[in-house]
Image (cartoon, grey):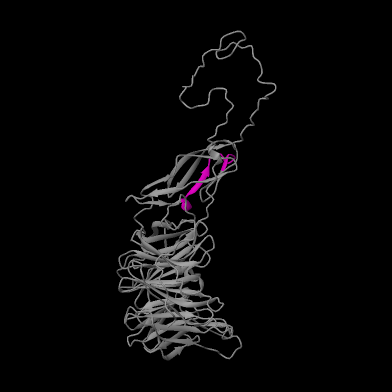
Amino acid sequence: MTTALRKPAMMLMALVTGICLWVSQTATSYADICSSRLEAEWTQLYGDSTNYNTPDHVAPTADGGFVMLSDLTSRNFGPTSLHVIKTDASGGTEWETDFFDNHYVTEAYHGYDIQQTRDGGYIIGAALDDRSNGGPLYRAYLLKLSSTGQVEWNWAYSTVFQNPVNSVQETSDGGFIVTSSTYNRSDTAPAYVFKTDKDGNLQWDHTFRYSGGGPTDFRDGQVFNAAAETSDGGFWVVGRYYDSSTYYPLLVKYNASGKLISKRMKETSDWGRLDYKQIIPSADGKGYIMLNAEGLWEIDRSGNTLWNLRLTDSSPELDDISFLQMNQVDDGYLVLGKDQTSDDHVILKLSAEGKTMDVLRQEIPGYTGNFNNASLLQDGGFVYLNSIESSAYLQLTKFKLVSQGEQPGEGEFFLDDSEYSVTVNDMIDIVALFKKPDGTVLPVTKETRFSIENPEIASIDEEGNIIGLAPGLTSIKAEYNGQTAAASLLVVKPYVPKPVNRISEETGPAKSDSTDSGSVVPGSTDPEPSNPVPADSGDTASGSSDPDTSNPGSADPDSSEPSTPDPAGAEPGTSQP
């Protein structure tokens, strides 16, 4: 269920002017990244505080919306289920579902990948924490959903110790190619790949084992990260292997039946130094493009290098950037990267021949850079999924490229209130908001600079949290992109109730000689009460000592614990193929 928060923490807003590093002289017609900047178009929140929400993956859908995969765990420490949310183009929830398969003896499912399929449905790559034989045994797991989130089928695969799904991709025959890594109880860690039909039935699998002869070469991780289908029905699979205390990039070719045809290993002058994370068909149709953290490599259909571009070596401004995601566009590639020591992000436009056309480097405060939770879009923007408020909520933010001529200051900047009050030693938070010309309202608290007129009365931090220090009246000033907003702040002492003076029944009330109205003078007639109580009102007469029996504070507070969510969309699992 989508939930609004008063002040989401770590707002992923970016309205900072980007820095163009260079534009190649061969640059052609494309949306000028160099003359643009990244701006947060919208942010949406999902979930509720009764659960832990751990983001796994986000992917765009054919209708312009997005699909999100996360792990959902009750704060009562219940089982962990898979949670899927489908949104429209603005991040509004269209449907959501939970999945927990009771067919297995398990406490958790962990998601890794989700992609839309050609029939409009969704394929999920996950891991099953199988405890049937005393576990835990993390088995590769696939879940197929319909276009509306209904379960169509689900299967578990392999029986090794650790076997999560690193990627899942639909194939031309409607089936799926799945890449994985493993870890056996024998302390070996071969890579793993398998192919299924359209219903999830296993067609073939292969465990890639490499040992260079060293005693530990087989223990620290042979990994398959991604796969690309070839024109003959086979697959190129990329990842890494370990040899003599060093990781090397790995490229393996399989035929349509899963037989290993060739492999390419070790570093050469035209080969990478780091493991490949992604492989896609090349824009020029000659072969395939592979991406690792330092750049791109194009190979032909036989696996020979056509060209390589070590982006981190090409410019001092890029030597600290890690590149972990790319998209093919009409005339080349878009690449997303992040500085390893700061909040700077880089978007590059490359030609089909690997020539740099545009580069945008820009700071985006608060973005942690988990690229599995980001998805690069065809227009040069991207979406990012993270969790906030101690994993109580998921937060999805869409960043878009906008022209430098469209100034972010155009619009209205304001605070969520004009008057605030707080008790000494207590804290409140304020929210800074920006209303764009089209009416869209964005939280911009993290990008706002706050100050207090009288800092001895109260303090305010960069996230808008105010702490009362001493009683008094002061004002708050907020600045955002050249606009200012102000509000008053009243700090008061804590309320301390005074003790009630009980009248002794023995001594009675003190006597008074006063003859004011309402007093009784010895020998005189009792006056009429100034506010007579109607006889039929049911109220206790003046002077009665009967206690007030309503006592609103006596009711027990609601002490019920949040219930474990009833997982939706779950169907009985099927046996292992």
Residue lying at the far front of the rendered structure: 536
Judging depth in this view, the residue of 208 and 449 nearest the camera is 208
Give the position of the N terminus as an image quadrant: bottom left
Q: Is residue 449 magenta?
A: yes
* Residue at image location 58% in from the left, 85% down from the top: 186
Whether residue 359 can be seen here: no
Q: Position of residue 95 (x, y in %)?
A: 36, 62
Q: Is residue 230 above or below residue 383?
A: below
Q: Is residue 304 above or below residue 534?
A: below
Q: Position of residue 288 (x, y in %)?
A: 37, 82
Q: Quadrant of residue 545?
A: top right
Q: Is residue 13 magenta?
A: no
Q: Position of residue 207 (x, y in %)?
A: 48, 86
Judging depth in this view, the residue of 332 and 102 nearest the camera is 102
Judging depth in this view, the residue of 401 and 171 nearest the camera is 171
Judging depth in this view, the residue of 51 and 272 nearest the camera is 51
Q: Is residue 179 left or right of residue 558?
A: left
Q: Position of residue 446 (x, y in %)?
A: 48, 53
Residue lying at the far right of the rendered structure: 506
Q: Is residue 486 left or right of residue 471?
A: left
Q: Which residues are magenta?
A: 445-458
Q: Is residue 434 left or right of residue 474?
A: left
* Residue at image location 50% in from the left, 41% down from the top: 476
